[in-house]
Amino acid sequence: MKLKVNEIFKSIQGESTYAGLPCSFIRLTGCNLRCSYCDTVYAFEKGIDMSFDEILSDMELLGCNLIEITGGEPLHQEGTSEVVKELLGQGYKVLVETNGTLNIDVLPEGTVRIVDIKCPGSGMAERMDWKNMERLWKTDEVKFVLSSREDYEWSKVIIDKYVLTEKSKVLMSVAFGRLEPRPLAHWILQDGLEVRLQLQLHRYIWPPGAQEGTLLRSTCRHEKGVGSSTS
Ligand code: SF4
């Protein structure tokens, strides 16, 4: 079993309820979407094939118990769930950040699934697999990345429609450079929403385009753009 890997690095987890913890990141190559604010276009094609043993060896070298598999879109590659299963078997805590358009149930029990819900501002809202809302576990997290007030109002409708706050943790964050956190904080407080306002912590530590933490492998880091980092 091999996965096409764009980069492997250690950094501070920045976009979930695990934010602030040291974390090893495996960024997989390829994505089925093209979000308007994507800052990981460099991961769309380039990567190297790695076996599970090679990936495990890198994880041991980086030395974090927490691992996040991101992309690109991790579920775009067939071998992802098998690798997650093996990593769980080794005792790691594994987060998988996925864009919400592919079936999350392919991931094994024990995975923490961080599911993006693509808002209209991303240009990809019509690509969502809404059946995923029925597949959520309590340990999962759903995340809205907002570009505008319109995205916020749309998100409230989706939260109500799928009763999301009862099914999993719900996060709202801002698309970097499009919406400031302060108005979002006001809206959440005014509406009494039971959601977690989540800042992209790594954005406040490292400026856009800068190397985050320790880079172990990279196939095309120099092509990195700027914007909001999502899955
Ligand atoms: S933001 Fe995530 S889901 Fe959207 S195009 Fe970029 S990698 Fe794919």
Image: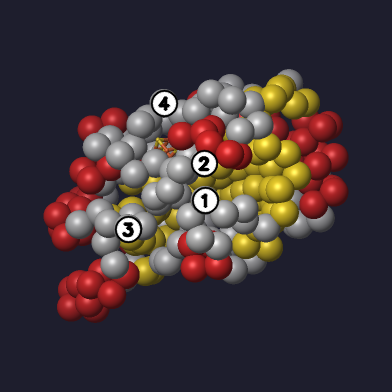
Which mark is nearer the camera, 1 or 3?
1
Mark 2 falls on what kind of element? loop
Q: Nearer the viewer, residue 163 or 10?
A: 10
- Is 44 positioned to the left or the right of 48 in the image? left
**Residue 209, label in figure:** 1
Q: Are marks 3 and 2 in contact (CB under 8 Å)?
A: no
- Is 156 positioned to the left or the right of 12 in the image? left
The residue located at (84%, 48%) in the rendering is 60
Label 2, label 4: how far apart the Cα atoms are: 18 Å
Question: What is the three-letter code of the residue carrying label 1?
Answer: Gly
Task: List x then y, in percent, for residue 108.
Answer: 61, 38
Q: Earlier in the sequence, mark 4 or mark 1?
A: 4
Which residue was labeled with disc 2?
224
Label 4, label 1: how far apart the Cα atoms are: 23 Å
- Is 68 positioned to the left or the right of 165 in the image? right
Question: What is the three-letter code of the residue carrying label 3?
Answer: Gly
Q: Is residue 147 visible?
A: yes
Label 3, label 4: how far apart the Cα atoms are: 24 Å
State whether label 4 is within 8 Å of ligand 1: yes
Label 3, label 2: how far apart the Cα atoms are: 16 Å
Q: Are marks 1 and 3 in contact (CB under 8 Å)?
A: no
Mark 3 falls on what kind of element? loop
Mark 4 falls on what kind of element? loop
The residue located at (24%, 37%) in the rendering is 123
Q: Are marks 2 and 1 in contact (CB under 8 Å)?
A: yes
Question: What is the three-letter code of the residue carrying label 4?
Answer: Asn
Q: Residues within 10 Å of mark 3 (few under 14, many from 20)?
A: few
Which residue was labeled with disc 3?
177
**Residue 32, label in figure:** 4
